[in-house]
Amino acid sequence: VTDVAAVTDETELSLTTAPITRTQIVRFAGAAGDFNPMHHDEPFAQAAGQPGVFAMGASCRPRSSRAPWPTGLGART
Amino acid sequence: VADASHVGTVIDEVDMPVEPGKVREFAIAVGDEDQDSVPLTFAAVASHWRDQAAMVAMLGLDIRRVVVGASEWEYGAPVLVGDRLAGRRIVTDVVVKAGGQTIITLETALHRGDGELAVTQRDTVIELAP
């Protein structure tokens, strides 16, 4: 379970998603063009000292994108 | 090895069309119900049009120790499907910690086709200590 919070000057969004699958990670890799092997290549990630592949941070944050483009606001995630 | 001398360096430039097919693909990948509007973090796509390996090499980083610390988006004019996003990625800060960890801040101001600033993306890249 992943908790994600996105904060703008005027709103605070918080949501919880289901566990992330490898298929979701690979889908985001293709859609965003993020082919860092840490996110899809298990032996590579393990050689780098990680227990396995892990999702991109940005693959979670855009879930707050249901909000309208916050013109004029400084938005941080 | 990245150090303060890199501040101000232009890493690369990007100029990307905001194509309807890519917008839909990205919206699905991030679980967005509206698959025809440009997601707020669509700038991530422009990010990966750039050569990340070249950035890592330019800054002398060890990719095995590089993680993304944070990303921040500051919004200006809205972007619609069919527009463009274009901008330069610039090093704005490099901090080398005593333990050997390096924290690099990169900023990309992405402009629409008409020149209006659409979104400024700031990325914090961390090279962990060896």
Image (cartoon, rainbow, N blue to C red):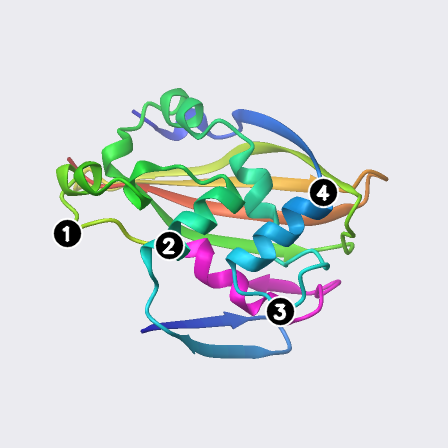
Write the residue at 44% across / 30% down. Answer: B52
Residue B2, picture quadrant: top left
**At x 71% / y 68%, what residue is drawn?**
A68
Report the disc number at residue B33.
3
Above/below status of A5 relative to A22: below
Residue type pointed to by label 4: Glu
Residues marked 3 and 4, same chain: yes
* Residue wearing tag 4: B19
> For the residue carrying disc 3, how many other residues have a C-alpha within 10 Å: few (<14), some (14-19), or many (20+)?
few
Nearer to the camera, B25 or B113: B25
* Subunit of label 1: A
Give the Cα distance between marks 3 and 2.
Answer: 19 Å
How many C-alpha atoms fall within 10 Å of the one at disc 2: few (<14), some, or many (≥20)?
Answer: few
| Marks 1 and 4 in Cβ contact (< 8 Å) | no
Instruction: Specify the amino acid type for callout 1.
Output: Pro
To which chain does the residue with label 4 belong? B
The residue tagged 2 is A23
Task: Find numbered disc 4 in the image and state the secondary structure of the residue it sits on.
Answer: loop
- Asked if the residue at tag 4 contacts the one at tag 2, i.e. Cβ–Cβ closer than 8 Å, the answer is no
Is B53 positioned to the left or the right of B50 in the image? Answer: left
The chain holding disc 2 is A
Percent x, y for residue B92? Answer: 50, 37
* Mark with earlier residue (3, 4): 4
Query: Is residue B15 among the parts visible in the rendering?
Result: yes
